[in-house]
Amino acid sequence: MHHLITYLADAPWITFNTGAFSDQFWASTFDGLTYGSIYALVAMGYTLVYGVLQLINFAHSEVFIVGVYATVFALNAMGFGPSPVYPPMVVLIIDLLVAMVAAMIASGLTALILERVAYRPLRKRNAPRLVFLITAIGASFTIQYLIFVWRGGSNAEPATIMFVPDPVFEVFSTIIDSQQLTIFIAAIVLMVVTDQFINRTKFGRGIRAVAQDPDTATLMGVNKERVIMLTFVIGGVLAGAAALFYLMKVPQGASFNGGFVLGIKAFAAAVLGGIGNIRGALLGGLLLGVVSNYGVTLLGNSSWTDVVAFVVLVVVLMVRPTGLLGESLGKARV
Amino acid sequence: MSKARLTRALALVAAASFALSACAANSDNGSGNGGNNGSTKVDIPVVTNLPVSPNAAKPAGDGKGKCSGVSLAYAGAKSGANAQLGINILNGVKLAIQEHNQANKDCQVKLKEFDTEGDPGKAPGVVTQLLSESDIIGMVGLPFSGESKATGGAIDKANLVHITPSATNPDLTKNGWTTFYRALGNDSVQGPAAAKFITGKLQAKVICVIQDDSDYGIGLANAANQALGAAAQGCQDKVTTGQKDFSATTAKVINAKADAVFYAGYYAEGAPLDQQLVTKGFKGTFIGPDGVKDDQFIKQAGSASANAFFTCPCVPGELIPDFAKAYEGVSGGTAPGTYSLEGYDAATILLKGIDSGIKDRAALRDFVKSYDGDGFSKHFKWNPDGELAQSTVYGYKVQDGKIQYVGTIS
Amino acid sequence: MTSDEIIDLVEMVVLVAVLVAVGKLFQRSKASGRLGEWWNSKSRVEQWAWLVPLIAVVVLIPVINPPFLTTEPGTNFPITMFNCALYALVALGLNVVVGQAGLLDLGYVGFFAVGAYVAALFTSPDSQLSKIPYLWTLPLAMVVTMFFGVVLGTPTLRLRGDYLAIVTLGFGEIVRLLATLMPPLKGNVGFQDVGHPPGTKADGGALFANTNGTPWYMLTIGIILIVLLLVGNLERSRVGRAWVAIREDEDAAEMMGVPVFKFKLWAFAIGAAIGGLSGSLFAGQVSFVNNQKFDVPTSVLFLAAVVLGGSGNKVGVLLGGFVIAYIPFRFTALASYKYLIFGVALVVLMIFRPQGLLGARQRLLARGRQAYQRLIGRPEQLSSDSSLVAEKAGDSA
């Protein structure tokens, strides 16, 4: 035993590259924020559904990956492909918006179907939580391997390049490019809009009411089933938007199991911020993006992002299972 | 906020943020901030004809073969993630057997196919089954080094001769097996050949060697590094199977101002790596081994793949018109792929043995051991270990969105 | 679809239908409960008298090689049977965690991997550690994985059930990623020539070669029987009752004075140990270990085995493990759809038959059989609803 530990520990398999870390500190911060805003968008889906149903929608990562495929097909139909094209600015904006709407529709529909086919029958039966989770895993597998069979194997879709990032301005002598800026701003705006939607509109009030107390909400005339559907759809739509940004960042991102790791990270982000808490999802996403990017720079291999994300998840759950901003969608200020 | 207003607001902000990106996109493709040595693009012309030995053995033989109740086997991936390579080989084998059986009415050899999914965990069960069928007296396979390693001992015990058309790990012939024959050069031939190609014909001065985490990638990178010496000393990196984001690696390459990147691994990671390199402003050439030489590479890397060259111990079967045409008849219209011709040649050798009257495994093994003759891909004569006495490495490049042959490089 | 695929699909449906029908025979329902009732009326000794010949048949299956069941000429039948037995063992271990204690563990493959790496590190010539005989790695793997189980369980078992699921999922991935990233674990390259038990065949070859499935199968069946005995005794003891109590209602159990955390940790650690044991068996038979086999889909297959067989029912999960491993080997034309089939099966099962092929038996009395016979003059009436059926007693399926 002792022998085993020395063997594994003695080898210099983990080296802290502090030089690179301090050199690239700001670069990895900004890139981390970009990834983080994508995590945050996906995390919203987990948080919303969890807030209303106390269900970890394990299949949300597949809702996301369906959006990625929709983006790829929409963009390919509009002439984008593995080689950059340079349409006029207005055309590009319209194209990207169309692709985003396509992804939002695809992801929203997937989430809706998932709710109707897999979860509603269980709700009718008052099934325990474990059953929901196992069903979610089954649904996630089903969607993944439907894509696998449909695309004839595990090859990723060809790269889809939307535009070539160009430097926009410089902060702390680090270049911020147009891609980072687009993703960050668009994602934050989407999340602020969602937050306002939940807080200010009648539908939002319904969601909050059901999250707080489903039975009382029903008595007060809230249509619970409709609220649940709406929650799934909003989560799906945000995942669809995230899909476009993800593809912007990772042009070969459309592969049948490509959603899985991102889904786990987004879930970790949701827990980190306090699951059920929308602003928590935003904070958690950004934080996780930055921290795991630091991990990469410090440890020098991008496979470490996943390890860092998982370790963050475990540590947060151990130290503060309610997350940074505290749980729950219904309560307090959301 | 009403639903309509919400939608409008959404569209507005999204549009505003996209405007940023579009500004950038419009302002010309001038993101060349990754300075490299102003690399002089070397043009190596495409070669469109392949000299084939006039004595190359044909599966048909003289049409006078006599045999009955003997079978040959193919064992390798037919499904799973690595299926394409296996199918390329299988179609070559199928074609050889079809041509043989058409010409030799008195010798109808049956082909038995076994699917290992290229998985070293699955192969033993499949091969055990294959070995227990006594009518099988020779085998083409197994395509991958891992599965060959896992089953070679058992095959040796059963005396079944097998010719691998694609397993290139050098250690495979060092196990003392008497039944293992390799129809192509191994990685310790390909690595140095690639190095010579990069520094010679491609005139690269600063080279980055990137390896994946497979046995194959590590072995190739070591062989290439030894041959490259100082030229690649300053720039080495490792990636892992399944990786998609190569920003750390691309930063390294750009900082090193490399003229060339040699990627020892497979196309699944090679394609996004090349694409990300080019996007980040890499202007040099990208060189990959046989694991990267695949149409999927071009599909996934897009126009970035225009900077790519490949080294491969495989012969461009598509340049032999008769073979290519016949192959398409078997494969349902697809052109010969990597290792199709090697599979065809390997099956031809075994068929020649059967036509000479051999009925059992031991005799066919001895036949292959002493075989000395031309095939379509090369001259076949093995040393006692099962390595070819001489082997060639071929060069390829991407041009006009296709993989094209540029001549031998060793 | 090709004709091969259709034939395989039809045969698979027939197989599953037969299994469901057999499962029904053992159910409680009035029409078809005869077999279950008959079985429960027997004493333990009588039950064993029936079981021994059955076990003999099971042990000899690879030698018999029955015509419809055989997986030849695709894969050697004894090797298929070893894989089935291995999955059965895995399912048995995971059942302690999921079925008996009600803890959803999605990272079970992590323990399996740790077991496999223990075997590889201590027997493969590719490892620089000093070598020990292969059979010693089996208990060692159990100890090491038990240790991992306690280390992982101590902080996380206090969490809610669904959080636990995600943390274990993370654990499984961390194990795989560390195997990739830590050079001593040799990533994708892996360890060749992992050891095997001693013994030679008549022709001088190793008895436990990776091409010789029968001895591996019999070894695994032997281990399954031992584990079944141990787990069965635990189930009937105070520990087992505590697990059922925790599974059914954790809060109530806590109120009644059950040390919930302690027993959860026990279940987790015992499950982990069995996972490690099966991992080292896997490493021995395949004789090659690298980082490619321990991914989340495999973990979900393990879970599918438990759920399919009947979470909480030992015999059921053994059957589930067998079926899950067997289907891809037997119905080769469907091999590329295997995960799709299992994914759909999970959803359908959870919606229509959450108790699986054979449901859990909620036997809370250690000597229930005799007690029932004496009290009401007829065999015990067992509920076959597992904890997965419904939360409220009123509306069970």
Image: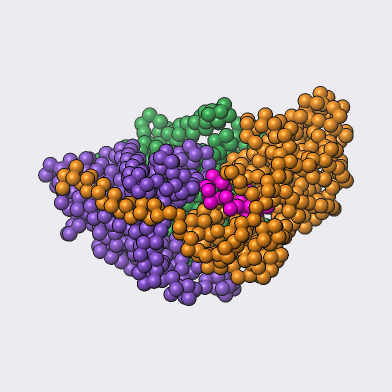
Chain colours: A purple, B orange, C green
- Which is more toward the observer, C62 or B279? B279
Magenta span: B287-313
Residue at position x 80%, y 26% in the image: B103
Residue at position x 77%, y 25% in the image: B102
Q: Give the total of numbered labels.
A: 0
Residue at position x 17%, y 59% in the image: A332
Q: Position of residue C112 (x, y in %)?
A: 53, 56
Q: For the view shown, which residue lies furthest in the top direction?
A: B105
Residue at position x 76%, y 55% in the image: B410
- Which is more toward the observer, A51 or C214? A51
Q: Position of residue A297 (x, y in %)?
A: 46, 68
Tell me if residue A180 can be seen. Answer: no
A90 left or right of C22 in image? left
Q: Locate the C terminus of chain C and report the quarter of the image it occupies.
A: top left
**Picture layout, residue C132 above or below residue B157:** below
Q: For the view shown, which residue lies furthest in the left direction?
A: A220
- Which is more toward the observer, A65 or C183? A65
B188 left or right of A260 in image? right
- Which is more toward the observer, A212 or C390? A212
Q: Quadrant of residue B194?
A: bottom right
Q: Quadrant of residue A126?
A: top left
C311 left or right of B189 in image? left
Q: Position of residue B346 (x, y in %)?
A: 77, 41
Tell me if residue B302 can be seen. Answer: yes
Q: Position of residue C15 (x, y in %)?
A: 52, 32
Q: Is residue C134 magenta?
A: no
